[in-house]
Image (spheres, grey):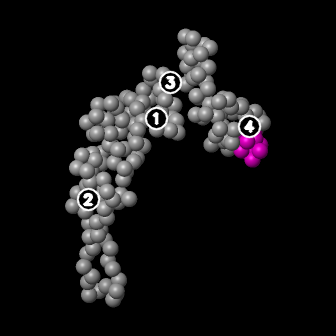
Amino acid sequence: RLEGTPKDAPIMTYCTGGIRCVKVGAYLTQELGFTNVSRLAGGIIAYDRTLNEKCDGEESMFKGTNFVFDGRLGRQITEDALANCVTCGAETSLVSNCRNHNCHQRIVQCEACRTSYHGTCSIACKNRVVNGAMTPRRLDFQTPITSNSPVGEKNSVLEYGNLDDYSMGHSS
C-alpha cells in the first residue's frame, strides 16, 4: 500500500495502547526509509482518557468501539455503531466471541441477536450450546473400500447429514 508514497509523506499511526505503533514506526523508518512518521502516544486508550479528563465537551476524532486485548474485547469510545451484526445486518458496535468454545469466533452482533442466539454466531453453534454438546467430537464416516482401491488404502470422503454434524466434525 505504501509503494509509490514519497518517503517524506506524513504517516500517523495509532493503536489500542501505543505499543504496536512504536514497532510499526520503527519498521517504517528503519526498514522502509520513511522520514515523517509519528504516532499517537499511549494509543486510543490514552487519547480517550485525555479527552475525558482535560477536554470536556470536545468531540472525539475516534468513533465507535476500541478493540482491547482483555475479556471486554472492546471499550466504547463513542455511541457510533460502525459495524453490522453478522446475524441480521443491523448497525451495532458490540464485539464478542462465540460462546461455543469449539468455535470461539470473534463476531460483531447486535444485542437482540446476541440474546436470541445465546451469544453464538450461528444456529449450529447455538444448538451445540443449548444442547450441551460442547465437547469435541469427530465424525468418521468413510465410504467403503471398493475393489478398485489399492489394498490397505482408506477412502476418507466425509459425508455429513446436516450443518450440526459438519460443525461437530470440524470443531476441535
Q: Which residue is mark 1?
A: 72
Q: Earlier in the sequence, mark 2 or mark 3?
A: 3
Which one is closest to the eye, mark 4 or mark 3?
3
Residue 96 appears at what percent x and percent y? 40, 38
Q: Position of residue 170 (x, y in %)?
A: 35, 60
x then y, percent, for residue 37: 73, 34
Quadrant of the rendered image containing residue 41: top right
The verdict on residue 28 being magenta is yes
Q: Quadrant of residue 59?
A: top right
| Mark toward the start of the polypeptide (1 vs 2) | 1
> What secondary structure predominates along the stretch shown in magenta?
helix
Q: Is residue 60 left or right of residue 18?
A: left
Residue under the point 21% across and 61% down: 161
Tell me the residue that label 4 is attached to. Answer: 6
Residue at image position (67%, 41%) is 24
Q: Which residue is mark 2?
A: 165
Up the image or down, 150 lies above or below 6; here it is below
Label located before the other in sequence (1 or 4): 4
Amino acid bearing label 2: Asp
Q: Is residue 41 left or right of residue 143?
A: right
Q: Which-is-in-front pick, marks 1 and 4?
A: 1
As helix, strand or loop, the secondary structure at mark 1 comes to: loop
Q: Nearer the viewer, residue 34 or 137?
A: 137
| Secondary structure beneath label 2 | helix
Mark 4–mark 2 CB contact (< 8 Å): no
Q: Badge 3 local density, few (<14 within 10 Å), some, or many (20+)?
A: some
Magenta extent: 25-34
Residue at the spot of label 3: 77
